[in-house]
Image (cartoon, helix red, strand yellow):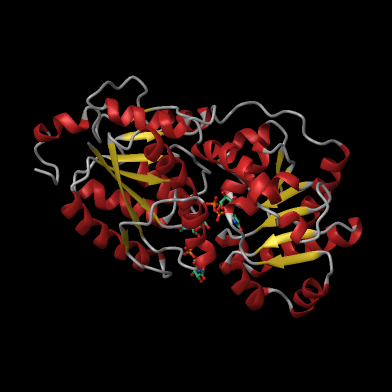
Amino acid sequence: MLKLLTVIGARPQIIKAAALSRVIKHAYSALVREVIVHTGQHYDPQMSAVFFEELQIPQPNYNLQVGSGKHGEQTARMISAIEEILEVEKPHFLLIYGDTNSTLAGAIAASKSNVPIVHVEAGLRSFAKRMPEEVNRILSDHVSTYLFPPTQTGLTNLLNEGFRADNRPPYTQDNPGIFLAGDIMYDNCLFYSALAATQSNIVATLHLEPNCYILATVHRNNNTDEADRLNAIFKAFQTLTSHHHIPLVLPLHPRTLKQMDALLTADLYKAVQENPFIRLIDPVSFLDMMQLEQQAKLIITDSGGVQKEAFFFRKPCIVLRAQTEWTEIVVSGSARLCDADTQLIVNAYSDFEQSPPVSFLPFYGEGKTATTIVDILLASGATSNYAVTGNDVRS
Ligand code: UD1
Ligand code: UDP
């Protein structure tokens, strides 16, 4: 039996984990045992528990309850606790998703314990190391044994950093295997968008007309924590809604809610609160998000996941960043980088209204990424050869 220890902590990782847990439950329960460690990086019920319930993810075997904090403090608490768990559980692999502090903590703890790391969503780069996520990605990739870039761009980035596509098994940290397996969120979007069609009523509940509203999300640290940027983004929301008389739905990340209060000018904050077109709502469940995305006219976001979901659902997307890791969607014309520039955002909306995007090539695989990952790990022979690896925590 292959023992996989999965580390998750932030909202998008909990959602990603649903895809792997689902295929293990339905097709590999006799071959794979997954132990889930939730770091507790996200902890509000709407940022965590809702996804376990709705997406039927097994309850975590461990919850580290690390909570919020400065980067070093938060990550250090996670590393220390994960190291202890690795000693007890002795897994064949530690699996991490994406680029959060929970990802990095898993990578550091496992690499120092000689547990092979599986990095799902490897190779993505923004080429902006001021982003905490960029540092987390690079460091995690460079100690991983199995790397699963979701796109050709991710694979190319790894090759440019010296990774080799022609490495052969047995894979190790020094001889890692790279596999272009597609995007695990595409698996999830195919599966859960079908469920959402019958199980979510959010569009009707919010009294929205399909294809007649904007969906927006904002949570990237530079957008929420820099007053100029946050004000410019909300000014764009004000301008768009008042010029076009179109509702804008904004499920608020808790970080953004706190910073609006602290950083928006009093006039703008009041105007936003009194604007009947701007609908500030709590974070929504994933099925509700699937519905909101599918029925939106256009999506405005700084989220990595939401940018891509806009593409899956063939929606034009205004990206509130200067660069993105998901370059394909910008190059193919369905998304536009507008940073936190009010005028660029307003112009992009008008341009997309006049010429909606038409090109949606299959950059993200076929929606079978979770199965491919499990098959590759099972084929690694980890369960039979671990006794000869000598220096790992299981010996
Ligand atoms: C984190 C990730 C980011 C990811 C995002 C997904 C890092 C460095 N950042 O950013 O890459 O895109 O998650 O949503 O790992 N808070 C709450 N309740 C919660 C969680 C957070 O109130 O359940 C508030 C706290 O004030 C906290 C702040 O949000 O300080 C930021 O949370 P944190 O997890 O540090 O970063 P995110 O901005 O969520
Ligand atoms: N999401 C959600 N409810 C919300 C906002 C986002 O379910 O209110 C989902 C979204 O569909 C996507 C994921 O959360 O799958 C993205 O998470 P987030 O934007 O927090 O992080 P990022 O992808 O930028 O790391």
Image quarter of the N terminus: top left
Q: How many numbered marks appear?
A: 0
Is residue 328 depicted above or below 299 in this figure?
Answer: above
Q: Quadrant of residue 389?
A: top left
The image position of residue 335, as x and y in percent, is 70, 40
Front residue of 332 and 372 = 372
Residue 189 rendering spot, x and y as whole percentages:
58, 40
- Give the residue furthest to the bottom: 266
Position of residue 112 measured from the top left corner of the image (x, y, whole percent): 21, 49
Location of residue 197 in the rendering, given as x and y in whole percent from the top left corner: 68, 44
> Does residue 156 appear to the left or right of 90 in the view shown?
right
Q: Is residue 321 visible?
A: no
Relative to 30, say whether 6 is above or below: below
Q: Residue at x 35, y 61 (%)?
A: 75
Task: Please identify the quadrant where the C terminus is shown.
Answer: top left
Drawn side of residue 354 relative to residue 123, left or right: right
User: Which quadrant of the view contains residue 26?
Assistant: top left
Q: Nearer the viewer, residue 147 or 189?
A: 189
Residue sitting at 29 percent across and 37 percent down? Answer: 32
Q: Is residue 310 left or right of residue 40?
A: right
Residue at 25% in and 62% down = 81
* 387 displayed left or right of 258: left
Q: Is residue 9 visible?
A: yes
